Image (tube, rainbow, N blue to C red):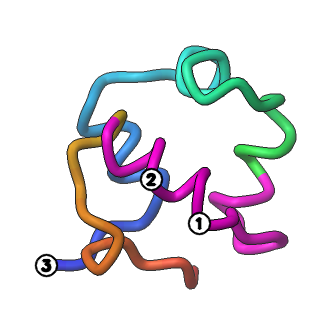
Amino acid sequence: MLLTLKAARVNRQLTQREAAMQLSISEQTLSNYERAISYPDVPMLQKMEILYGVEYRNLDFTL
C-alpha cells in the first residue's frame, strides 16, 4: 500500500515541525516534499524510511 509523505508522518503522530527537526531540515523543505514541489535526495529518503517506518518503495511522491 502506497502512502503519501504526509500520511506516513501523520501515522507516526508527528507534526511537520517535529518531523523536520528529527530530519534536520526546515519545515518549509518538508512541506515542499509533502506537496511534491521538490523531492528528497537518497540520504534524506533513508532518514525518512527510518523515521516513518516505511520503505521508500511504499511512499507515493505524487498528490
Question: What residue is shown at x 69% (from left), y 65% (from top)?
Answer: 41
Question: Mark 1 highlights which residue?
Answer: 42
Instruction: Tell me the element at label 1.
Output: helix
Secondary structure that dominates the magenta span: helix
The amino acid beneath tag 2 is Gln
Marks 3 & 2, CB-CB < 8 Å contact: no
Give above or below for 22 relative to 6. above
The amino acid beneath tag 3 is Met
Magenta span: 32-50
Instruction: Tell me the element at label 3.
Output: loop
Question: Mark 2 highlights which residue?
Answer: 46
Instruction: Tell me the element at label 2.
Output: helix
The amino acid beneath tag 1 is Val
- In the image, which is nearer the foreground, mark 1 or mark 3? 1
Residue in front for this viewpoint, 36 or 46: 46
Which quadrant of the figure has residue 32? bottom right
Whole-number angstrom distance, CA of label 2 to CA of label 1? 6 Å
Marks 2 & 1, CB-CB < 8 Å contact: yes
Q: Earlier in the sequence, mark 3 or mark 2?
A: 3
Q: Which mark is residue 28?
A: none
